Amino acid sequence: MEIPDKAKLFGYTFLAYHIDLEWLFHAMCKVRVDGAVGVDKMTAAEYGHGERLMGLLDRFKTGTYKAPPVRRVCFPEKGTPQGGGNPPLLSNIFLNEVIDVWFYSDVKPRMKGRSFEIRYADDVLLGFEYREDAQRVLEVLSKRLAKYGLAMNMEKTKLVHFKTPGNKGQRETDTFDFLGFTHYWSRSRKNNWVVKRKTAKDRLNRALKKANEWLKENRHMKTNNQWTVLCKKLMGHYAYYGITFNMRAITQYYFRLIQLWFKWLNRRSRNKMMNWDKFKRKILANFQLPMPRIVHSYS
């Protein structure tokens, strides 16, 4: 406060000269009580109007107060944030006009054979009776998407020969992955050709990798707490991948998860805690994990 006394022309350029307890009190009254955190990482309701204001004023006058960094929110000019709640909704609204309406109103009537479209969010599957129809649409589809500022992921886009297997000597049918499942032709119990689905290899490996990382990071957690989390992981896996003809894949996930649990329980210390028999007797017998089961069945 010495500078304003010596140089009165410049004294009022210092903000500290204007601020007093009354000024802070009026400023606090104008701040939303339910607003975001601010000074000292507290909301206005938490800060109050008593001793904290006096302390803030003293720190400001002495120059020891440091303002918190400003939080900035960036809005992308193109696209939507990955993993947010809005992208699925926005993609459904947008792609309904770009792909769905366009396919059934303009594309399908021009095809020589039968055709269909299946879309979930931004994953699209197009089926055609004749290969030439599929090639024609594939050439036009990229131009259609580019018109609306979109582009196809060429690593995931491919033309697949997926037809009911015939006699020997004919071309073998391909497989394809869609929504985490590998689709393939196989015989049913009645010896009829049917489309079966199993967990895609990359999805199974990714699920096991995440489980392995979690068990590694939480290997010192209490066994009953680990068991609770593993039960949730298994139930969530069954809820999505537990479909008809996929029992082998979800059973594989079940046994691999047990092996990972055994592995990281034995790495709690340098000395091996238990062998496999002791693990089954002490752990699996007392902490039973949900068995694989088919949640979604269809004929």
Image: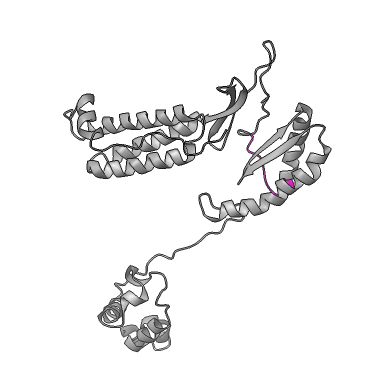
Residue 75 position by quadrant = bottom right
Please determine whether, in this image, residue 291 is positioned above or below residue 63. Answer: above
Q: Is residue 153 magenta?
A: yes
Name the side, left or right, on which 205 lies relative to 184: left
Q: Is residue 177 visible?
A: yes
Query: How many callouts does the rendering have?
Result: 0
Q: Position of residue 227 (x, y in %)?
A: 28, 41
Please determine whether, in this image, residue 193 is positioned above or below residue 55. Answer: above
Residue farthest to the front, as pictured:
190
Name the side, left or right, on which 46 lies relative to 122: left
Which residue sits at x=21%, y=25%? 277
Q: Position of residue 146 (x, y in %)?
A: 72, 45
Residue 3 position by quadrant = bottom left
Magenta segment boundaries in residue numbering: 146-154
Which residue sits at x=72%, y=49%? 98
Q: Quadrant of the N terminus?
A: bottom left
Which residue sits at x=37%, y=70%? 67
Q: Position of residue 114 (x, y in %)?
A: 77, 34
Look at the magenta stretch and give its main secondary structure: loop
Q: Position of residue 135 (x, y in %)?
A: 76, 30
Please determine whether, in this image, residue 15 is positioned above or below residue 76. Answer: below
